[in-house]
Structure formats: C-alpha cells, structure tokens
C-alpha cells in the first residue's frame, strides 16, 4: 500500500485520517513518518455503521474515545429489520 506514496515522493504525513492500524503500520514501517492520527469524526459515520465501527475499534482500530470490552459489545445493537 505505501508503494504509491513512495513513488509520489511522500516522506511525511502530517494528519492521517484513518482508523486502520494495518494502513498505519504499513506506512510507518515503510519509512514514512505520520505526525498525527485523526479518527473519523462520529458525525461522519452513518448511523447504521456503528456496530461495525465499534467492533473494529475493539479489535484494534485507532480511537481517542472509548474502547468497548467484549461484554459491552454484546449489548450493541444495529438497525432493526423493521426500520429498513
């Protein structure tokens, strides 16, 4: 993934807007500095993506906020079928 960044001559990213540790680790391990990681703001997340995002955060995605425990994740509910 970082190959294209190296091809473009990028040596440093001031603000990375991604919560993915896979992307972050690949970029940093390839020698590109990341100054600040920025999580995706809650208001930019669709309401029906909350279940997926909470699970990803619990499995290691970057956040400055609350990380749910396995027990707390059991109580998270998505949209009901009737609301579709």
Image (cartoon, helix red, strand yellow):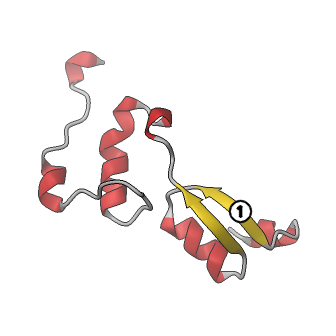
As drawn, 23 above or below 56: below
Residue 42's spot in the image, x, y percent?
Answer: 43, 39
Q: Residues within 10 Å of mark 1 (few under 14, many from 20)?
A: few
Task: Report helix, strand or loop for mark 1.
Answer: strand
Residue located 70% across and 75% down the image: 33
Residue located 41% across and 57% down the image: 64
Residue 26's spot in the image, x, y percent?
Answer: 61, 74
Residue 16 relative to residue 64: left or right? right
As drawn, 22 above or below 29: above
Residue located 26% across and 17% down the image: 83
User: Looking at the image, which is closer to me, 84 or 32?
Assistant: 32
User: Looking at the image, which is closer to me, 77 or 36?
Assistant: 36
The answer to which quarter of the image holds residue 60 is: bottom left
Residue 60 relative to residue 83: left or right? right
Residue wearing tag 1: 14
Say which quadrant the C terminus sits in: top left
The answer to which quarter of the image holds residue 14 is: bottom right
Say which quadrant the N terminus sits in: bottom right
The answer to which quarter of the image holds residue 35 is: bottom right
As drawn, 2 above or below 75: below
As drawn, 80 above or below 41: above
Residue 63 relative to residue 69: left or right? right
Residue 4's spot in the image, x, y percent?
Answer: 79, 66
Total marks drawn? 1
């Amino acid at each position: 993934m970082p190959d294209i960044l190296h091809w473009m001559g990028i040596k440093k990213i001031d603000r990375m807007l991604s919560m993915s540790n896979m992307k972050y680790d690949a970029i940093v391990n390839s020698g590109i500095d990341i100054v600040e990681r920025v999580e995706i703001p809650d208001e930019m997340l669709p309401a029906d993506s909350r279940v997926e995002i909470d699970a990803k955060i619990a499995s290691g995605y970057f956040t400055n906020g609350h990380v749910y425990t396995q027990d707390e994740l059991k109580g998270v509910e998505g949209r009901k079928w009737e609301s579709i």
